[in-house]
Structure formats: C-alpha cells, structure tokens
Amino acid sequence: MDGFSSQPISPATRTTAWAIIAFLVLPITIVFAVAVTDRDYLAMPVDEISFQHYANLFTSPEWLHSIWQSFVIAFVSTAIAGLLGTLCAIGCWRISNRLSELVRVFMLLPVMVPTIVYALGIYQFFAELRLLDTYLGLIIAHAVTGLPYVVITVSTSLAGFDGKLERAALGLGASMGQTLRLVILPNIMPGVVSGLIFAFIHSWDELVITLFIAGRAVFTLPRRMWDGINEALDPTMAAVAAVLVVITVALLTLELLLRGRAKK
Amino acid sequence: MATTGTSAAHAQNSPGRLTVNSIMGSEGRYWLLIAPAVLLMLGFYFYPLARVLWMSFTFPTPGLGNYEDLIDNASVHRTLITTARIGVITTGLTLIFAYLISYVLVHAKPKVERIMFLGVLIPLWISALVRGFSWFILLRREGTINDVLIGTGIIDTPLDLIWNELGVVIGMVHYMLPLGVLPIYANMRNIDTRCVAAARGLGASRGVAFRKVFLPLSMPGVIGAGILVFIYSLGFYVTPALLGGGKTLMIAEYIQLQIMDLVNWGRGAMLATTLLVTILLLLGVMSRIIDLRGLFGGK
C-alpha cells in the first residue's frame, strides 16, 4: 500500500538487511553464553549454567584492581576532556571565523590519525618526561584523544542554539561567566553529556596507547583482557566481556534517552 | 581602553574579520576559552606526532635511509601489500552491506527504522576488543562454529577460520560496518524520494529508476564512507592482531613489533609516517568531495 509514494523495497532486500544486522549484533551475544559455562575453558555451557566465572571476576583482586584503575583513569580524563572540549567548542562557535574553524578541524584529527602513530610519539615523549606506567600519563593521553568526541557533540548542540539568547544576556549586563553558566550551558547540556559519555567509553576501552605507555604499575582492564586473550583461555574473560557490553549498552541508552528528551 | 565597549560591539557586527579591535575586544576573551584545549593538544598530541615524523628522517642517521625499506625490504613490502589488500576487501564488503542497510533504513517505517538503527549503533560503541574476542570464541578451531558444523556432521575436520586473512576480514567488516552506515545513511536521508517517484511516473522501471536516479544521488555518501572505512582499516590494530594471530601482519601490528620487540625505531617511525601521510592525503581528497564537518556533526 505504501509503495505508491515511497519506493517499495523487495522482501529479499529487506531480509538481507536484517541478516546483516544479525551479523552485527548476534556474534557479540556469544560472550553471554560462554560467560555462564560450567567448563573451565571457552565453551558453551554443557550440563548446566554456572555463575562461577562471574564470581571469579568479582572476587579476583587482579581484575578488581584493573577495573578500579580503568575507572579512575576514564573518570579523570573524561572530566578534563569534557571541560576543555566544551569551552573550546563554545569559543569556536562564538568566534566562527576561518581561524577558529581551522582550530576545530585540528581538534578532530585524533579521530582520524591512527592510534598506533600517536602511541609511538607519546611513548617516546613520556619516556623522557618519566610518565610511563603512571596514572598521570594515561590520563593525559586519554584526555587528549577523548577531546574530539566532546568537541563534536557540543558543536552539534551549539549549531541548534540561538546565538541571540547569548547576546541578549550580555546586552542585559550579564558577565561572560554568568552567560556561559546560566544561558549557554543549560541549553547545550545534552551535547555536553553525550560528549562525556563518548569520551568515557573511549578511555575505558582504549588499548593501543595503553599497550605502549603502561604495563606494570598501571594495568587497565583492556590491557588485562588483552593479555588474557593471548595467554590464557579462561572463561572469566567472557564474563568480563559480558559486563563491558552491559555497561556500554547502559551508557548508550542513557545517551539516547537524553537526546530524545532534548528533542522534545 | 575606554573604547572596549564599542570595539566589542564592532566585533560582534563583523565576526568574520580578525582586526586588532576584535582581538582585544570580546573575541579575544573567546580565544581564552579555546586556549587550554589548544595548548593541551599542541603539547601532548601534535608535538609527539611531530617527533615521530622527525625521527623517521633522523634516526639512526640523518637522511632518507629508513625510507629505502619501502623500496627494497621484502617484509615491509609484504606488510604493505597485505594491509592494502585487506583494506580494499574490507572497504568493498563494508560498502555493499552498509548500502543495503541504509537503503532499507530510509525506506522503513519510523518505528522499524529506530530498531534497525539501534542494531547499528550498539555494536558501534562496543569495544573492538570485546567484538574481536567474540569472533575469537566463534571462529577458532575448537570454536562454536566448528563445534556446530562437526556436531551436525557437515564437516569432519575443523575449518581454519581464524589466524588467516579470512578471520581478519570477518572481524574488520564487523568493526567497520557501523562506521560505513553512518555517512551513507546520513546522505540518503537527504535524498528527495520524489525524484525517484517522478522517474517511475515517467515510465522508468524500478531498476532503472534506482540506477539512474537514486544511485547517483547517494554516491557522495558512498565515497565518504569508502574513504573513511579505508582510512580506519589501514591503521587498525586490535582486530587484525587478535584474529590474524601474528601470521597475517598488517602495518599497525608490524609497527608495534618493530618498536616493542625489535626496538627498531627508525623503521617503526618511517612506517608510522608513511601511514600518516597516506591517510592525510586520503582525507584531503575526501574533504574536496564531501563536507567533513557534516560527517562528524551528524554522529
């Protein structure tokens, strides 16, 4: 019936598209099945479902320590990226001449430049600064590479914000700080929160830089997973992966809800 | 400084012009907002990157010595060719799949569209490590797929699905697909479907209307997605390292081996520079074809 106005799609095309979506989503769900295996190697549950690997994960000092380290690093680097990225996006939006546009494009480069290239440079630089294997080193590296996500989402929010409101506030005698805090920020909050969420996920999952600049005192969750996959085939790995999927989906749902509310 | 107020007003009237007045007036204050982020980036992003470029020409001896490997080193050749081949195959497959998904997405009812789009968005944000690990469980010799195939009697000996190019390509396409869908889908949403309806009304068959009207209109998105996916594929580390098992070496893993295992900084820096320059050139081409800002802003 609806084939008249919009272009009809053949059932074959539609089925193929859904099959590709299944190819995207279903493989990830295997970690949930393997996480509850009753074996001590990576396999589907055979006789019964067992939560021993989850129990193992949440009682193992090594895993808990890595989770804690990852959390601290992600939290602090996200705070830095969020603050600096938001201010930068507002500044670029307000000035919006050729130079500030150039600044904005340069801020986006870390998304395009392969991490391996940056990892080499920061590894050598941090060796000189004695920042290898420290919280501070990882926090700086993750904040810098997380900045683009904040700049992108806040810029998108600002594109939909009426600049006249800001001029009105300034014209009525508000200081620049007051205008920022009371007029601009509340209006672009969804963009800021989205940026924070993406920057957090970025740091929380980051592996390549971590492989180069940390490895003993600081041993993040992705780093421990990496060694786990390469050395032992312990199903605890699957439990970790399952927990990570749940956290990511939860953060993403939060982001979508916020964006949905911003539209209304 | 008595004229600060008027110069600020002046700057607001012509925000595009960078005059002394505008710098000292309100615009200067906005540059202060930008400064911390720019300084952090200059000190801890661009400076370390520049050092890599510099080192590729100066270490161990000044000159183009490191770059001779590009011409006459067999293992460098093999890595570059493997990287290019996997990049092209991954990009081709990703584009076909992404186009199909996007096409169905834009023609679906809003509710179906939302659910389907979620199926693209969720994998996008799940870490490469977790996704690579999932494929590892599925594809390895004792993995789920081989277990099922042997259990049902379809095959007798397990298939080699991992630690070769097949495994890498499967994992890469899985990782790149959501990235490919975003630009194509964003572009298709802006296509006026009445153009297609008009072609149909004028007697074109469904296939002809698609080929002559819809397909050309959707090409900017396809080209943007193609370059984007190709760029990401070239420099990707996690998935190839996980599913290639050290046998299928792509450039990122090769660089890491040069630095961490062989401590061959000259070659590592040279390959990193080559990779960076290649990608910047591709980005330059891309920015001439499509609006990069729209691509990222739409995310």
Image: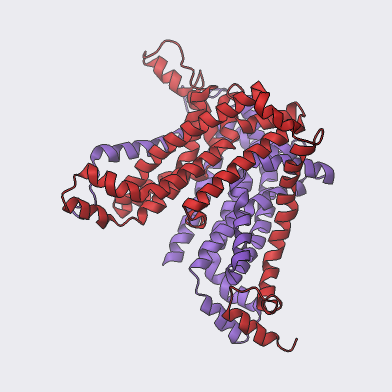
Chain colours: A purple, B red
Seen from the viewer's position, the closer of residues B211 and A70 is B211
- Name the residue: 77% across, 29% down: B263
**x then y, percent, for residue B44:** 74, 51
**x then y, percent, for residue A13:** 28, 39
- Name the residue: 59% across, 86% down: A171
Q: Is residue B230 left or right of residue A17?
A: right
Residue A33 visible from this viewpoint:
no
Seen from the viewer's position, the closer of residues A254 and B260 is B260
Is B235 placed above or below B155 here?
Answer: below
**x then y, percent, for residue B190:** 36, 57
Seen from the viewer's position, the closer of residues B167 and B20 is B20
The quarter holding residue A91 reads: bottom right
Q: Is residue B66 left or right of residue A92?
A: right
- Name the residue: 63% across, 52% down: A146
Is B211 placed above or below A192 here?
Answer: above
**x then y, percent, for residue A189:** 55, 66
Residue B33 visible from this viewpoint:
yes
Location of the C terminus of chain A (image quadrant): bottom left
Is B28 placed above or below B124 here?
Answer: below
- Name the residue: 67% across, 23% down: B73
